[in-house]
Amino acid sequence: MRKCLIGFGAFASALALSLGSAVPAPAATGTLKISVLIRTGVDEPHLTKTFTNPADGCTNLGLPWSNSTGSVANQTGVIVWLYPGRDCQGSTYEAVGPHSNLEEHEGGVGSFLVDASAAG
């Protein structure tokens, strides 16, 4: 019985260590700034969203991106993939490299994807 308890204790300790060492999702280090000029024909507002250390995965922008033009400043160490729709669905619209800018971006951007695991 004693050997069984010792074996179970070792198993429980190993299980607790493996569960406790889960690695959180990586984030891109730096900032991602997306600016847009919405063409309304009357008063054309300029909106900007800045993401500091954007999370790994897909992010919906939550801004009115259709009928717009703008720019993207990627000051992270990873490629950021832009998509026209929500939830990073459809064909990739544009890729913005690490520490680079995309000026005069035409069209809508509904979401972006960060894959920090692919960082060099």
Image: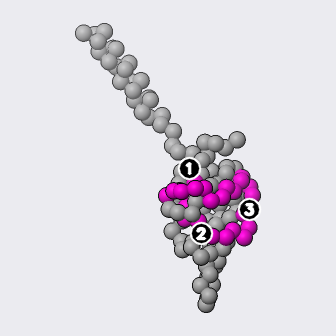
Q: Locate residue 5: give its quadrant.
A: top left
Please provide percent x and percent y for residue 114. Answer: 59, 52
Magenta residues (range): 87-113
Give the amino acid at mark 3.
Asn
Query: Which residue was labeled with disc 3?
Result: 101
Residue 99 forms part of the magenta stretch: yes
The image position of residue 103, as x and y in percent, is: 74, 67
Residue drawn where x is 59% and y is 76% of the image = 67
Rounded to the nearest angstrom, the CA distance separating label 2 from label 3 is: 17 Å
Does the magenta-highlighted stretch encompass residue 112? yes
Q: Callout 1, which amino acid?
A: Asp
Question: Which residue occupies 61% across, 90% down?
Answer: 42
Give the percent coordinates (x, y) of residue 21: 48, 34
SS under mark 3: strand
Out of 68 and 98, give the one closest to the viewer.
Answer: 68
In this view, the mark in front (2 or 3): 2
Q: Which marked residue is nearer to the observer: mark 3 or mark 1?
A: 3
- Packing grade of label 1 (10 A; few <14, some 14-19, many >=20) is some
Q: Which marked residue is nearer to the observer: mark 1 or mark 2? A: 2
Give the mark nearer the N terminus: 1 vs 2. Answer: 1
Near mark 3 (Cα within 10 A), the count class, few <14, some 14-19 or many ≥20, is: some
Left or right: residue 108 versus residue 98 is: left
- Tag 2: Cα neighbours inside 10 Å, few (<14), some, or many (≥20)? many
Q: Which residue is mark 2?
A: 108
State whether residue 44 appears in this view. Answer: yes
